[in-house]
Image (tube, helix red, strand yellow):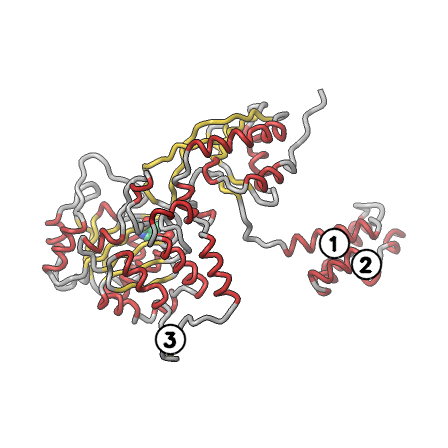
Amino acid sequence: VNQLASLPSVDRLLKHDVLIELISVSGRDQVTDTIRERLSELRQQLSEGAINECPDDNQLAKEIAARVNGQNAASLKRVFNLTGTVIHTNLGRVSLPAAAIQAMNTAAAYPTNLEYDLASGKRGDRDTHIESLLAELTGAEAATVVNNNAAAVMLTLNSLAMGSEVPVSRGELVEIGGSFRIPDIMARSGCHLIEVGTTNRTHLKDFAGAINTNTALIMKVHTSNYEVQGFTKSVDEAELAVLAHEHHLPFVSDLGSGTLIDLTQFGLPHEPTAAETITAGADIVTFSGDKLMGGPQAGLIVGSRELVDRIKSNPMKRALRVDKITLAALYEVLRLYRDPSSLAQKLPGLHLLTRPLTDIQQIATQILPLFESTLGHRYNVSQQSCQSQIGSGSLPLDLLPSVAIAVTAKDGKDQTLVELAQNLRQLPIPVIGRITNGVMLMDLRCMEDISTFCNQLKSLISPQPQND
Ligand SMILES: *Cc1c(COP(=O)(O)O)cnc(C)c1O
């Protein structure tokens, strides 16, 4: 109990060099609060006899600094995505091109003409910054942008079909990861889903039979994350557009990922483009900015002037609109599509999707020895062929050949691998791989910045070998 008297005062600690330095970075209040918190813990532990003596001031100052720095560490961190899924929604989907990052910086740092028409000096419209470029790239008359494609679908349905019926094929009642389900979005958008056809087969006559005076539009949903195979039939865009127009109804297509150009020119599978869908007769097309398009999170709505104007005049547009930073990035990403020949170098998402296998192989050969020297005492490390996924519900069945570092535990215990995964996640830039069937795979398709990766790998906190 005498030891209680040896506890330093708050004032004494505040004068410690380490904490003076910390105050200059983090402010006096947080440091003072943390000192009080630590001293009160020590008082408790000493009086209960849990410890016998108080740490010295140097030790205490270090502990307090570590605690304050821990509290101030950002929760949103950069990570290495070695999961093998390129467009990984939980890891923030795609990185943006340099030009977009530059534009985001400028938009963040300075006032902008976001909604200000420089020619007339009057109020402007934020969509004007990207509308003509989107029109050029998709062949649509008009365009608007919202927070993400889920918002684009919701706003479109709410603007054009509230209180009315929307027929959709039973084969297209998609659930995207998380909680985006077409039937739920329809309900929340205030329209009545009319299911037509069956899970595997839907015919034009099913749609025709569903149309009545309460029908607001016909909708097609891209089956992004699954494929119905075998005895199947769906109705294509062109046929649905003709049917809709015969009944003076709009035809709306949710492309999900969608793209702006034909990806087969990069050796990737074909994904419907917004332009193809407009050409097929769609009156409104919605798609994501941050799936295959490779831009910032956004939902793009393109189509006829009249319908886009109706969508834009919905009061909910205000609640779903994008900010100046997104618009700045989106413009730069869209601009890159004017020159498809340089797209695979300039757009990080496409760059990773089209990375030659030999490049990935070379990275594996380069970093394997480091993995061996860091982990070799406890783990078997090797190179292994693997397959990357495109991800985010884009082209679900198309896999890309890749190379992984494969790690197994020498003791064969799952727990030993789980520990490694944990340690990798605790690195300054956490490394995220995947464990399947007792093997930890780190797919190197998305490995960039190899020197940073290698430098931090050396500090991997890995239990030392048993003495034997
Ligand atoms: C991904 C997807 C959405 C949602 O898009 P977000 O950009 O994630 O909001 C909607 N519809 C389909 C068909 C999708 O694939």
Label 2 – label 3 distance at C-alpha? 57 Å
Judged left or right of residue 447, residue 45 is right
Q: Is mark 1 within 8 Å of ligand 1?
A: no
- The mark closer to the camera, 2 or 3, is 3
Sequence-earlier tag: 3 or 1: 1
Q: Amino acid at mark 2?
A: Leu
> Going 61% across and 26% down the picture, which residue do you hit?
376
Camera-side residue: 227 or 122? 122
> Of label 2 and label 3, which has the lower sequence position?
2
Residue, far bottom: 121
The mark found on residue 13 in the picture is: 2
- Which residue shows up at 25% across the image and 51% down it? 221
Residue type at the position of mark 1: Ile
| Mark 1 touches mark 2? (CB < 8 Å) | yes
Tell me if 194 is positioned left or right of 428 in this view.
Answer: left
Coordinates of residue 68 in the picture (x, y in percent): 69, 56
Q: Is residue 96 left or right of residue 182?
A: right
Q: Is residue 388 visible?
A: yes
In space, the residues marked 1 and 2 are separated at their CA atoms by 10 Å
Label of residue 117 in the image: 3
Check the picture and name the quadrant holding the C terminus.
top right
- Secondary structure of the residue carrying tag 2 is helix
Please tell me which residue is depicted at 43% across the width and 65% down the height of the picture. 323
Type of amino acid under label 3: Asp
| Residue contact at pointers 3 and 1, CB within 8 angstroms | no
| Vertical placement of residue 74 versus 429, above or below | below
Horizontal arrangement in the rendering, residue 274 relative to residue 420 (left or right): left
Q: Residues within 10 Å of mark 3 (few under 14, many from 20)?
A: some
Question: What's the mark number on residue 64?
Answer: 1
